[in-house]
Image: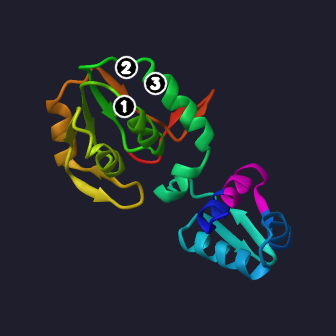
Amino acid sequence: MLAIERRTHILSTLEVEKRVLVPELAKKYLVSEETIRRDLEKLENEGLLKKTYGGAVRTENISADPPYKMRVETNKAQKLIIADKIQKLIQSKENIFLDASSTSVHIAKNLKKFAQLTIITNSVEVLVECSAAENINLVSTGGNLRGSSLSLVGNSATHIINQVTADRAIISCKGLDFEKGIMESSL
């Protein structure tokens, strides 16, 4: 298992159990306790957890956005299922807006199969994924690079989005709650 995959799993465990212990993680991932401590230190430096004696607890900073490389691996199997279902809804010659979510990259991989599409996106990763696909007209929103999400944001991006028309917009969110509704970490 790669270090980034292990850290993603650690974060997933924290979401459910609210705490993790170094010896348990070392045993679970068949690595040394020192390796786990380094993982926890890296995650703490990114603001994703708080190290404690012998382990770590989840931070309550709900605005903390895990790095893109972690998000793309989290719940990957479910994201691939979503991508397959969305592909069945798309038709050639449509204009599709894809947001900068980690799920959108999986969707973009499937959309490269279509004969003719226009993809409008603020996602650097979607731009890279589709850049060599000759059958896709790729429109970038431009804007300021937000490194943590590999997204293009700000007034320039908003201006372009307001100028284009899409047949479909595929937009993810960070969470759903029956009482609070749809939640996102940034506008």
Q: Which residue is mark 3?
A: 86
User: Which region is colored magenta?
Assistant: 9-19
**Vertical arrangement, residue 14 with respect to residue 78, above or below:** below
**Marks 1 and 3: in contact by CB < 8 Å?**
no
Number of numbered discs on residues: 3
Q: Which residue is mark 2?
A: 90
Which one is nearer the viewer's eye here, 39 or 173?
A: 39
- Amino acid tagged 2: Ile
- Amino acid tagged 3: Ile
Which one is nearer the viewer's eye here, 81 or 14?
A: 81
- For the residue labelled by badge 2, is the local secondary structure a helix, a strand or a loop? loop
Q: Quadrant of residue 26?
A: bottom right
Task: Determine whether, in the image, residue 186 is placed left or right of residue 3.
Answer: left
**Marks 2 and 1: in contact by CB < 8 Å?**
yes
Q: Within the magenta stretch, is there residue 8?
A: no
**Vertical arrangement, residue 70 with respect to residue 107, above or below:** below
- For the residue labelled by badge 1, is the local secondary structure a helix, a strand or a loop? helix
**Marks 2 and 3: in contact by CB < 8 Å?**
yes
Q: Earlier in the sequence, mark 1 or mark 2?
A: 2
Q: Quadrant of residue 27?
A: bottom right
Image coordinates for residue 29, horizontal then vertical, percent: 78, 65
Can residue 64 be seen in the rendering of this structure? Answer: no
Q: Residues within 10 Å of mark 3 (few under 14, many from 20)?
A: some
Task: Determine whether, in the image, residue 128 is placed left or right of residue 25.
Answer: left
Can residue 39 be seen in the rendering of this structure? Answer: yes
Q: Which residue is mark 1?
A: 111
Q: Magenta region's main secondary structure?
A: helix
- Amino acid tagged 1: Leu
